[in-house]
Amino acid sequence: MLRIGVLVSGGGTNLQAIIDKIESGYIKDCSIVTVVTSRAGVYAIERANKYNIPSVCICRKNYQSLDEYDDALINHLEKNKVDLVVLAGFLSMLGERFNRRYEKRIINIHPSLIPSFCGKGYYGIVPHQKAIEYGVKVTGATVHFVELEYDAGPIIFQKAVDIKEDDTPEILQKRVMEEAEWDILPEAIKLYAEGRLLIEGRKVVIKSI
């Protein structure tokens, strides 16, 4: 049984997508054992409560250094025997200690087609704003393994979403979530749980069944 820790900072729509796929039986042999939020009072906590998933707020501002914050997160995840860390809209920075402790066991969903509109400062609504400003015709989402550099780890999946003439950043954000993020993040977790994701250099190879 794969034990998953999901880290979130907001409403938890990607968390819900994962829960739904586990509840339906599409993702097998895994369980979300803890939800960690970076802010108190976010709606993701209510989603966790609905499914009796323990949740906790571990806020960066309560720690003097990034190392101390890393240690607090690591201690909590180790206490819950977490095998895989899923960043599902988690906006707090993770440091070297955390990345080293969970190397090749952290996956993230990013709301663009990496390497476009990614890196430091590109989170939340920003990638969608920039995509519209640049006039690109296609954007999307990327699921990748996490490394210390922002949005630079090996890519697992990408899914494209067309940008429409009348899109606002908010409309585009919603459509990217619905058409891409909620699809490819659970799929990546499914394959990880099945032991089918292999990292070879900078590439992720999917083993056949």
Image: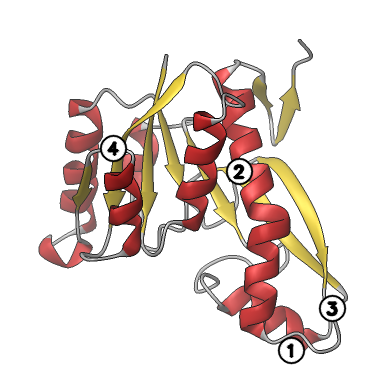
Q: Is residue 170 left or right of residue 131?
A: left
The amino acid marked with disc number 4 is: Ile
Residue marked by disc 1: 133
Residue name at image x 70 percent, y 68 percent: 175
Q: Nearer the viewer, mark 4 or mark 3?
A: 4
Residue name at image x 20 percent, y 60 percent: 59
Q: Is residue 13 visible?
A: yes
Q: Nearer the viewer, mark 4 or mark 2?
A: 4
Q: Nearer the viewer, mark 1 or mark 2?
A: 2
- Residue 90 sits in quarter: bottom left
Residue name at image x 67 percent, y 44 percent: 184
Mark 1–mark 3 distance (CA, rounded to whole Å): 8 Å
Task: From the viewer's side, name the closer residue of 27 and 196.
Answer: 27
Residue marked by disc 3: 136
Residue name at image x 78 percent, y 52 percent: 159
Question: Tags 4 and 3 in contact by the CB under 8 Å rule?
Answer: no
Dot 3 lies on which element?
loop
In the rendered structure, find residue 141 and report the number of the disc placed on it: none
Q: Nearer the viewer, mark 1 or mark 4?
A: 4
* Mark 4 or mark 2: whose residue is earlier in sequence: 4
Give the x, y percent position of residue 3: 37, 24
In the rendered structure, find residue 53 and report the number of the disc placed on it: 4
Q: Is residue 113 visible?
A: no
The amino acid marked with disc number 1 is: Glu
Q: Is residue 98 above or below residue 13?
A: above
The amino acid marked with disc number 3 is: Val
Q: Nearer the viewer, mark 3 or mark 2?
A: 2
